[in-house]
Image (cartoon, rainbow, N blue to C red):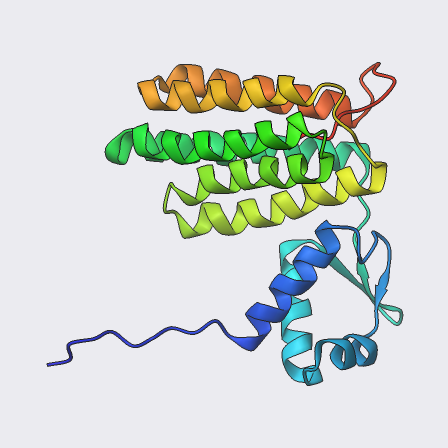
């Protein structure tokens, strides 16, 4: 009888896909760019086989698009697609919160989120907008990961990459970073109290506000918020 389960190592295509996903999200590979296999394989130090598999994964996720007789390109997002993306994010994050509360309550997860909020506050105090944005993304990633649903996490990773793409492309900035800190802490506090309805309401409000700022919404300077 075996004592240990086999060690599961991340596959090379998975690692490559992760690197490409991050580069796309951060704007290092801009929207609309064509991916050239030979150049990417050389830069990543990998063969073209696992690279193609990684690119196929991102195509299935919707981050890349294959155009016949032309090649593979990073997607560009219309305003309608951005709105649809936020609808999906709201649904995923609310579902994650419901799972967390149904399994073992939200206090432990809320404590994790509060630690991320502290990092957000430090970044806000220093007006470090890049660190603020990273902490913002980390907050939402932590929330969904805590639900321990592989499918929700997989979907959410793609949605966060699309969010990063939008923010990077439009060079968004927070008009008042401390306001965003308060919003995130309020969600964590509602989760700690086990108030599922309030968590849902706050998440919807948070996403609606982010979408409004991202798409213009009458603001002179849209805000970078996840």
Which residue is at 58% across, 23% downward? 181
In the image, residue 124 sits, relative to residue 38, either above or below, namely above
Q: Nearer the viewer, residue 23 or 119?
A: 119
Which residue is at 65% across, 34% downward? 132
Which residue is at 74% across, 25% downward? 174
Report the label total. Answer: 0
Q: Is residue 24 visible?
A: yes
Q: Position of residue 121 (x, y in %)?
A: 58, 27
Q: Position of residue 123 (x, y in %)?
A: 64, 32
Q: Position of residue 116 (x, y in %)?
A: 50, 35
Quadrant position of the N terminus in the picture: bottom left
Q: Nearer the viewer, residue 65 or 158?
A: 158
Is 6 displayed left or right of 67 in the figure?
A: left
Residue found farthest to the front: 126
In the image, residue 32 sits, relative to residue 45, either above or below, namely above
Q: Position of residue 193 (x, y in %)?
A: 32, 18
Q: In the figure, residue 67 lies in which quadrant?
A: bottom right
Q: In the figure, residue 113 lies in which quadrant?
A: top left
Is 5 displayed left or right of 24 in the figure?
A: left
């Amino acid at each position: 009888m075996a004592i240990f389960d086999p060690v599961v190592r991340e596959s090379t295509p998975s690692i490559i896909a992760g690197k490409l996903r991050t580069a796309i999200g951060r704007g290092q590979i801009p929207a609309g760019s064509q991916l050239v296999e030979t150049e990417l394989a050389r830069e990543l130090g990998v063969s073209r086989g696992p690279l193609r598999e990684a690119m196929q994964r991102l195509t299935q996720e919707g981050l890349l698009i294959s155009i016949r007789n032309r090649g593979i390109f990073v997607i560009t997002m219309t305003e309608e697609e951005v709105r649809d993306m936020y609808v999906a994010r709201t649904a995923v994050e609310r579902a994650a919160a419901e799972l967390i509360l149904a399994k073992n309550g939200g206090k432990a997860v809320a404590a994790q989120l509060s630690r991320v909020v502290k990092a957000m506050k430090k970044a806000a105090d220093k007006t470090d907008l890049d660190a603020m944005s990273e902490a913002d993304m980390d907050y939402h990633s932590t929330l969904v990961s805590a639900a321990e649903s592989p499918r929700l996490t997989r979907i959410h990773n793609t949605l966060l990459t699309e969010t990063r793409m939008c923010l990077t492309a439009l060079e968004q900035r927070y008009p008042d970073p401390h306001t965003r800190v308060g919003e995130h802490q309020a969600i964590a506090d509602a989760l700690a109290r086990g108030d599922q309805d309030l968590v849902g309401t706050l998440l919807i409000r948070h996403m609606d506000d982010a979408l409004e700022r991202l798409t213009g919404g009458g603001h002179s300077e849209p805000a970078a918020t996840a």
